[in-house]
Amino acid sequence: MNLKDRIDGVERRIEEACRKSGRGRDEVRLVAVSKKFALPVILEANRLGLQDFGENYAQELRDKQREAGEGTAGTLRWHFIGALQRNKVKYVVGKADLVHAVDNMALVTELDKRAAASGTRVRALVEINGGEQSKNGIRGDDLREFLEGSSRFQNVLLEGLMIMPPYFEDPEMSRPWFSGLREMRDKMVGEFPGMRELSMGMSNDFEVAIEEGATILRVGSALFGPRPE
């Protein structure tokens, strides 16, 4: 199966899941997880209609964006979807359209400082801990306190939540994590109206995520095939 066939297949699955759940296709953004794939593959995917690409490593995002050049600005949107270390923030600020996995106040502080210095603002999501298999992310019980603390920073805009549940062969097993994240967002959005995004759902379970309200999907292997070593 070639790249176009895989993209078309994923698009059909998204459209069908949106139809079944009574949602519009424009309510869901597809982020193609492109880590370790060479830039020519990304540019071909962009030519075939994809705009949003997710990278897990800060320096890889920086290097690919630099190699792509200014001519792709506006047609390629880069997302940073991995765990971000404070000493790598400089590679992401001003380059990533959205940072998906903010999970501690020290990181918010560093993002704010770097953004202020570069005259920009960082759009970000709060990562919620996905269970015992994931050490990243804050606990749901701590979310309100985290949002209140983050609200004092002028250059970091927290726009929603993300989660990475444990991997299950049966995608239905992920549903409680997705519905739980949606409920958590719904409780917060009245007090923090900017918190609308839900980044959840990957290659094996994104239809379930759509049914539970996902606004952003992070899909890699279903689009690109096996990842290069």
Image (tube, rainbow, N blue to C red):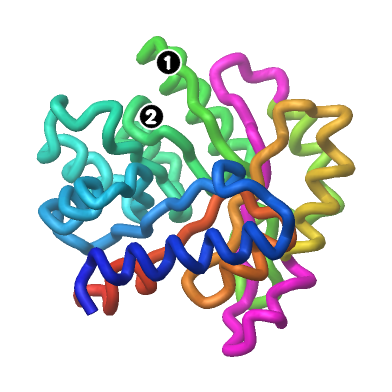
Which residue is located at x 65 percent, y 41 percent? 197
In the rendered image, the vertical position of residue 152 relative to residue 46, given as above or below: above
Density class for disc 2 (Cα within 10 Å; few <14, some 14-19, many ≥20) is: many
Q: Is residue 123 left or right of residue 184?
A: left
Residue closer to the observer: 66 or 27? 27
Q: Is residue 41 left or right of residue 118?
A: left
Density class for disc 1 (Cα within 10 Å; few <14, some 14-19, many ≥20) is: some
Q: What is the secondary structure assignment of the residue under circle 1?
A: loop
Which residue is located at x 40 percent, y 43 percent? 79
Q: Position of residue 220 (x, y in %)?
A: 38, 66
Q: Position of residue 94 (x, y in %)?
A: 35, 25
Q: What is the secondary structure assignment of the residue under circle 2?
A: loop
First-in-chain label (1 vs 2): 2
- Rendered image quadrant of residue 173: bottom right
Q: Which residue is mark 1?
A: 120
Q: Position of residue 119 (x, y in %)?
A: 40, 10
For the N terminus, the image quarter is: bottom left
Q: Looking at the image, which residue sits at the far bottom?
A: 169
In the rendered image, the vertical position of residue 9 relative to residue 180, given as above or below: below
Kind of residue indicated by mark 2: Val
Q: Which residue is mark 2?
A: 93
Q: Which residues are magenta?
A: 151-177
